[in-house]
Image: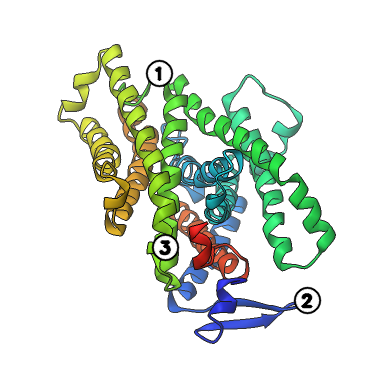
Amino acid sequence: MANIGTALEGKGFKSYDSLFGGKWYFRWTPYRAVALGLVGLLVFAIFYRLIRGLGPATNLNDHWPWGLWIAFDDLSGIALAAGGFFTAFMAHILNAKKYKMLARAALITSLFGYLIVSIGVLMDLGRWYNFWRPLVFWGYHSWLFVVLWCVILYLNVQVLQLGHIVFERVNVPKLKKIFDQILPALFVVGIMIACVHQSALGALYIAMIDRQDPLWWSMLLPLFFLLSAFFVGPAMCVVEGSLASKAYKMDFHHEMPLLVPVMKIGMWTMIIYFVLKMVDLAYRGYFMNMFAGTLESNLFLLEIVAGVIIPIILLAKPNEQQTVPRIVTAAVLMVGGLILDRMNVVFTSMGKAMGGHYFPHFIEFSISIGLVSFLLLAYCFMVENFKIFPDEHEHAH
């Protein structure tokens, strides 16, 4: 099929004539109307924050300079966008051709995820109108500088990668040929930037040695951030595929031969992550801290047990014994565990050292929820108008 919109025309999908020729599709539902309303709230909240400043728009203070936007929009968002570089590595670097269509959906999610991250970073800048200064004044000694440039470069690489898909639909043969030719180089560069970016986020918190709880602080934080992003990549592909299958009434079982093997890779990565985490705690003398019965230790155990150990157990069965409920449950737990980990790193691990009190402002929630709503609507538009999902016969190849 060319796209879902064409295949399901007349079943709730409305088509619109395009200047580029052909029809464009978008299905209106009550849920999408709510999402559009939240995007409208997002626009209001962004203007309010940019005009009024951080003080009136957030509950951030001298004790808590980083809040919801850093923990959820940025740290969690960047990690959850890892499905893009993971599947690109599998399909285009290891040349596992059967994963190429899977990589398309993951790359779309990753692109919109990084757009959300970029807006979140802009919102979190105290003087947002100085966003251009790091482009001119190079603070190359700072990990924040590395993170900024990784976001900028990777976002541009992803936009260029999108050209390969866009010009299949928008018939401009010369541009299609150019994007096809540069695509292999874009995948290599994108994967390199993504790996640096994921680990650089962990490196930011190495400087928090005097503030962060030892259950989370470690000199291995860059490696932990990279490994966790790597194993959550397949999980995001499963969650995304499951939700898309329900929304568009597709048979999710057709994707199981593709998703089960990549989830197995995620399982082995989780095992490495778990072993390194436990060895690191034991080496630093904090292994028993996780059983202290405090809020910090309980949240750490929840993160490890629900987000790592249980998914490993669920995925340990042979491939032929894996079922859709089992694989989806493991994926949801992996994603939830990753989000909890990033929240713990920002909030739980530094709560005692930071002191004071912080709870997100209405504007902070509005921007975060509105950005997620924008991602969902943008994703729906892409899959309804571009060839993102494979035909059933393509799953076998």
State which quarter of the image contains the N terminus: bottom right
Is residue 377 toward the left or the right of residue 156 in the image?
Answer: left
Point out which mark residue 254 bears.
3
The residue at the far bottom in this view is 10
Label 1 vs label 3: CA separation? 47 Å
The structure residue drawn at horizontal position 33% and vertical position 42%, both measured from the top left corner, is: 337
Q: Percent x, y for residue 76? A: 45, 43
- Helix or strand or loop: what does disc 2 sit on? loop
Count of numbered marks: 3
- Helix or strand or loop: what does disc 3 sit on? helix
Q: Identity of the amino acid at label 1?
A: Ile
Is residue 313 toward the left or the right of residue 59 in the image?
Answer: left
- Which marked residue is nearer to the observer: mark 1 or mark 3? 3
Is residue 282 toward the left or the right of residue 273 in the image?
Answer: left
The quadrant holding residue 271 is top left
Point out which mark residue 209 bears.
1
- Which marked residue is nearer to the observer: mark 2 or mark 3? 3
Q: Identity of the amino acid at label 3?
A: His
Q: Earlier in the sequence, mark 2 or mark 3?
A: 2
119 vs 284: above or below: below
Viewer-side residue, 29 vs 170 = 170
Q: Identity of the amino acid at label 2?
A: Leu
58 vs 324: above or below: above
The structure residue drawn at horizontal position 44% and vertical position 57%, both measured from the top left corner, is: 240
Crowdedness near tag 1: few (<14), some (14–19) or many (≥20) residues, C-alpha within 10 Å: some
Residue carrying label 2: 19
